Image (cartoon, helix red, strand yellow):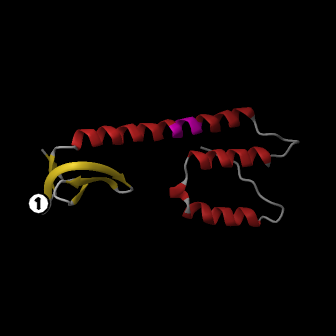
Amino acid sequence: MTVSSVTSSTGAASKSSSSTSTSTLGSLNSDTFLKLMLAELKNQDPTSPMDTAQYMSQLASFTQVEQATKTNTKLDTMLSASMIGRTVTSSDGTVSGTVASVQPSSNGVIAKLTNGKSLAIESGVTVS
């Protein structure tokens, strides 16, 4: 996705936005995308408006991001349903039990076991 930069007459806004954009990259979502697109439309040069092809490209990118988000949500739901009631064992064999619930996390999927323990579903975990 290409987003044109908007700079102020002093240039200070572009310096601060580039330093904060890397630190908040993980918190970007569809709302952020819409806010950026609206800011770009509001701040464009009236004598040289944005190319409609570029605008449509950005809109298509937004649609792809939204669909990917919905797909991830559906996949998480399917994974949760297929894991509940199954027995899982950690790769080193120290944690084992029946899955009571599954929660997505930033590091993957965490299985909550009926014995009160939690296990990250990762490479090496056995599901039976």
* Residue segment shown in magenta: 61-66
Q: Residue at x 79, y 46 (%)?
A: 42
The residue shown at (74%, 63%) is: 13
User: With 118 as the anchor, is 27 left or right in this view?
Assistant: right
Hey, which quadrant is residue 8 in on the image? Answer: bottom right
Q: Nearer the viewer, residue 82 or 90?
A: 82
Residue 40 seen in this snapshot: yes
Left or right, 76 with respect to 91, comes to right
Residue 66 location in percent, x, y? 52, 38
State which quarter of the image contains the N terminus: top right
Check disc 1 and report the residue beneath it.
93
Residue extending farthest right: 47
Give the quarter of the image for residue 38.
top right
User: Does residue 64 belong to the magenta stretch?
Assistant: yes
The residue at 24%/54% (across/down) is 112
Query: In x, y percent, where is residue 59?
Result: 63, 36
- Residue nearest the observer in this picture, 39 or 8: 39
Which kind of residue does numbered mark 1 sit on?
Gly
Q: Main secondary structure of the magenta part?
A: helix
Residue 83, percent from left and from top:
22, 43
Q: Is residue 88 magenta?
A: no
Q: Quadrant of the C terminus?
A: top left
Q: Secondary structure at mark 1?
A: loop
Left or right relative to 65: residue 91: left
Image quadrant in which you'd find residue 12: bottom right
> Is 39 placed above or below 71 here?
below
User: In x, y percent, where is residue 55?
Assistant: 69, 36
Mark 1 residue crowding within 10 angstroms, few (<14) / some (14–19) / many (20+): few
76 w.r.t. 117: above or below: above
Q: From where the camera sits, is residue 3 visible?
A: no
